[in-house]
Image (cartoon, grey):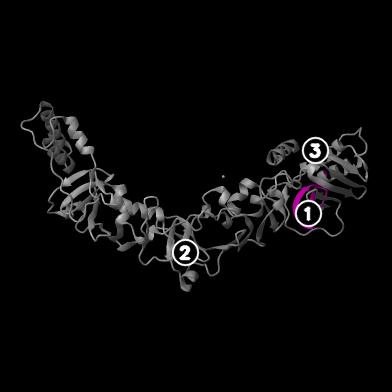
Amino acid sequence: MSEETKKDEYIAENADAEADTIFGAAPEVKPAPQKKGMAKNLKTLILALALAAVVGGGLTTVMLLRRATGGNESTDTTASTEAANIPLNTADVLNLTDVDIKGEEPFHLKRTFRGREDAAAKYTIEGYDGLALDEALLSTLVNNGNALEANRIAEEHVTEPAKYGLEPARAEVTLTYEDGTTFRFKVGDPAPTESSLTYCSVGDTVYLIRNSLVSNYCKTASSFLSKTLLEAPADEASYPVVDNMRITRRDLDRDIYLEYDTAAADDTSVGGTAATHVMREPIFTYLNVEKSKDITHGMFGLTADEVPVIRPTEEDLTRTGLDDPFCTVTMNTNDGESRVLKFGNTYESADGVTLYYTILEGTNEIFGVRADNAKWLTVQPGDISSSNIFVTNVWNIATLDIKDKAHKLNFAGEGNKDNYTVTKNGAACETERFRTLYRFLLYIYGEELYLGELPDGEPDAEVHLTTQNGKEDYTISFYRISDLKTVVARDGQPSYVIRSSALDTLSYNIDIFDDTDKEFKTTWQ
C-alpha cells in the first residue's frame, strides 16, 4: 500500500470531531339455517368436491362438503364461512389469575400484578422465583389463551379424540379467573394437510386453530426463561458510561484494559477519533470506534441461545468450567455498578451449535452463548485499535515541544479555530507553517502494535503536547531499533512500530522549519 493511500485512509478514519367471557364448557356453535333446495352453483361445487375427494380424499374435503351443504346458496358465502374465526374465549384478561399447563413438563403461571387498562398484568412461573423470565413470551402465552379463537370446526361431539392427538393431548390448559370460573382446552397434533393449523378441543368439539396461538403451550417452563444476560437500556441516552473494562483470558499473555477517555468524549478538545475509550493495557492505543463498540458496550443486550442450568451448584460451576473460567470480562460503569461476565467450557446444543457456558455474576442462571455474540472470547489488541498516534486538533494545542538529537523547538499556542496564533521559542512564528508541521505529525500512523520492551537509552526524537483545556498532557517518543523499524511509545509505554523513514522525515521537517523557502515533506518511503 502506498503512503498516499495510507494517508487517505488515515484522513478518512480521523476526520476532525466538530443510537367476557366463556367459562367452562365449549361454546355452542350452531349451524347456519338450512334453505330448501340447492342453487345451481352449489350443485356444481358439490360435484367438484366429490372429484377432489376421489383424487386427494381426506378429512379436509369431507369437512368442506359438510359445510357447503349447510351454508347459504352463494358459494362466496361458503368461502367466507371457512375463513371466519370462531371466538372460543372472550374473557377479560385483567381478571385472569392463573394458567395451568399439563404437557411434557407441567408448570403453572400465577399472577403477580393484576394490571390496569394502561398497564399489562405480570405473571411468574411457580418454582422459578428469582429467575429472569421472558415477559413478552409469557404475555403472549396468557393473551393467546384468554382470547383463543379457531379457524373452523373439525368435528363436533368427538368420540375418538386420539385420532387428533388429543388422547393423550400434547398439552392440557386451564385458565382460572377471579370469580373462580375456568376455561379449558387441549392441544393436539398439527393438521396433516394444513401445516399452519393444529387440532385443539374445547369440550367435545375439535377445532382447527393457528399454530402460533397454541405452540407455546407445548413448551417446557425453561423455554420462558429470559435469554438476555443484561438488558440494554431503552435508548442510547440511557446507557451508563463504561468507565473501564478488563478482559482476562487464558490465551492472552497480558490483560486487555480499556478506559473511558474524557478528552476524547469532548468533541472540542480532541479530533481524529470518535471512540470515547482508549486501550491502556497491554499497550496504549486509541480505539477504532466501529471495531471496539461490541467490546466496550456489548454486554448490554447480550443474548444466549439457551439456559441449560438454573440455580447452579458448585458442582455445576466445576462441570461447566465456570469455577476457573476461560475468559472473564469486568465492566465498571458510572452508576456504581460492577458487572462480571464469565465464560467456561464449550458444549454442543441439541441443534448442533457450539456454545460457551456463561454466567453473569449475581444471577441464578448459566447461559449458552455463541462465540459470535461474545467478541471478548477472541479479541486481540490489534483488532480494535486505531492507527492514530496524534489526535488533538491543532487549535487546541497549548504547547508543543519537538526535539531530536540535533534540534529543539518549543511552540506555544492560544486562541480557537478561527483566531489561533502560535509562537516558537518565545518569538513570533508563522502560524500556518506550524499548522503544516503539525499536520505532518497527524500523518504518522502506527503500522503494527509493539508488545515488546523499549530499547535502552534516550529516544531518537520526542514530542511533548499539552492542550489549552488541560485535559491532554502526553509525550510521544520515537526509538529507532533498525534501519527499517522505529518503536513509538506514549508516556514511556510502547505502542506501535513505524517505518524509520518516518522518523527521518520528522527530523528533516524540524531542520527546515525556519527556512520558509523549503516545503515540508509529508510522505516517506
Query: Which quadrant is the N terminus positioned in?
Result: top right
Residue 295: % across, % down: 60, 53
Check residue 523 in the rendering and tell me which mark sits there, or answer none: 3
Q: CA distance from mark 3 to mark 2?
A: 54 Å
Magenta part of the chain? 481-501
Q: Which residue occupies 12% across, 32% down?
A: 46
Q: Nearer the viewer, mark 3 or mark 2?
A: 2
Residue 431: % across, % down: 86, 38
Circle 1 crowding by C-alpha within 10 Å: few under 14, some 14–19, many from 20: many
Q: Based on the displayed image, in which of its 4 quarters is residue 435 positioned?
A: top right
Q: Does label 1 or label 3 sit earlier along the sequence? A: 1
Q: Which residue occupies 78% across, 49% down?
A: 469
Residue extending furthest bottom?
Answer: 314
Magenta-colored stretch includes residue 491:
yes
Which element type, helix, strand or loop, lies under badge 3? loop
Q: Is residue 72 left or right of residue 83?
A: left
Q: Which amino acid is tagged 1?
A: Ala
Q: Which amino acid is tagged 2?
A: Ile
Q: Does label 3 or label 2 sit earlier along the sequence? A: 2
Q: Which amino acid is tagged 3?
A: Thr
Q: CA distance from mark 2 to mark 1?
A: 42 Å
Residue at the disc numbered 2: 366
Circle 3 crowding by C-alpha within 10 Å: few under 14, some 14–19, many from 20: some
Which element type, helix, strand or loop, lies under badge 2? strand
Q: Is residue 73 left or right of residue 305?
A: left
Q: Are marks 1 and 3 in contact (CB under 8 Å)?
A: no
Circle 2 crowding by C-alpha within 10 Å: few under 14, some 14–19, many from 20: many
Residue at the disc numbered 1: 489
Q: Which residue occupies 25% across, 46% down?
A: 149
Q: Based on the displayed image, in which of its 4 quarters is residue 152 positioned?
A: top left
Which element type, helix, strand or loop, lies under badge 1? strand
